[in-house]
Image (cartoon, rainbow, N blue to C red):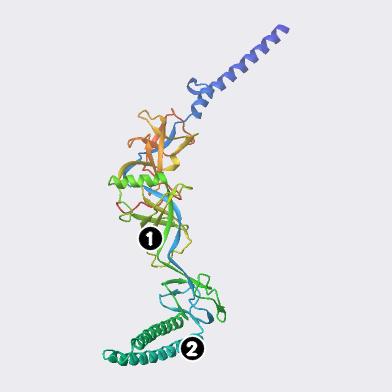
Amino acid sequence: MKLKSKTQKVGIYAAIGVVVVLLVLAFIPNGVSAQEEGQQAATPVLEVETSLPLYESITEWDQYTGRFEASNHVDVRARVSGFLEKVNFTDGQLVKKGQVLFVIDQRPYRIALDQAKANYAQTLTTVKIAEDNYSRVESLRATGAVSIEEYDQRKQALAHAKASLQLAEAKVDQAQLDLEFTKVKAPISGLVSRDRVNQGNLIDGGSANSTLLTTIVATSPIHFYFTASESSYLKYVRLANNGKRTDPRKKGIPVEIQLLDEEDFVHKGKLDFIDNQIDMQSGTIESRAVLENEDQLLEPGMFGKARVIGSAMHDAIMIPDHIIGTNQSVRFVYVLNDSSEVVSKAVELGPLHSNGLRIVREGLSKDDKLITNNLQKIRPGMLVHTSETNVVKGESELASLEHSQNL
């Protein structure tokens, strides 16, 4: 009985084992193990997009920061002292050259002019008397009826009277000029500041320490000053000497300026001045661009970015910034070889071009297929599926729309 019971148990266990094996085989088709199937599911072929780099003839632009300054600036001071009687302008208005801005009390200067004119008339009478006296002795000199001493005295008296007349005339001119100076006029056209001295105050005039009444700045045209390094200066000089760029000291070259709230370099000007020496402390040289500023948008003291032509026309390879990787000091991009494998290429980069793409100096050819997406997932040697796209223009605060002029 015991033997029969053991035999029945073995049969039951065997039947259970067969059922388990059949169930396992039912869920593993074609004899592939579960481990192998999991490995295949974990390593799918990645889809990436590729694009050829942009290759075309360009002119490179160099960028600098600087500030606007008035093309002319005048401190308005009176040339005579006195009581400030009138202020004839509104703070901040546009004034014309010769416009009367301030009026100083004219009464003391009218009195001084009248006195000078009276003195002139008196001196003129003295001259007339001296001329008559001299004429009489001159006619008698030939006959000997007058002494030489008398003749010389009357001649000297006439000369003295004439000199006194010149002095009196000069005093009249000075008094007339002082009276004119009581009207303080705008020496240039431009924007006037506020009145620094209010009506009713006494002011000093006629010296370097005279009272400052207001200031006037000329902003049309307006100047933009910026500095370039010594190496940039040498580059520009050599380009001009080789005939690849205009010499700015002989003929102004184009300059384009971007303001803080602008995305493009919309303000056009010309480089009209380069300083005559390199600053020994900073190693830079100052340059100036001039802009018309007819709409009075640009104000002295405003900050801006300028770009100037920095190269001759040449063929260049350009790529978007976002596909460039960094490995310590090495810049690289991923490209696709003929076997659909990912390859890493080290590149030497140049500046951003005006279309927002980065210029590549070395490391790429115009036929390289750039990988433009899934850059965090791919590695050199991986096999990938690809689809072709067009190169995407970069977006950067230093980038702007494609320059429309073929310079």
Q: Which residue carries the number 2 mark?
A: 111
> Is residue 265 visible in the rendered structure shown here?
no
Q: Residue at x 45, y 61 (%)?
A: 69
Determine which of the numbered discs, if any, sits on residue 190 in the image.
none
Q: Position of residue 245 (x, y in %)?
A: 30, 49
Measured in 3D between alpha carbons, the distance from the residue under mark 1 to the one under mark 2, in whole angstroms, is 48 Å
Relative to residue 312, is residue 175 drawn left or right? right
Q: Position of residue 367 (x, y in %)?
A: 32, 35
Q: Position of residue 150 (x, y in %)?
A: 36, 88
Q: Which residue carries the number 1 mark?
A: 290
Q: Position of residue 207 (x, y in %)?
A: 50, 72
Disc nearer the start of the sequence (1/2): 2
Q: Find numbered disc 1 in the image and state the secondary structure of the residue it sits on.
A: strand
Q: Residue at x 42, y 73 (%)?
A: 187
The N terminus: image quadrant: top right
Say above or below: 379 vs 129. Answer: above
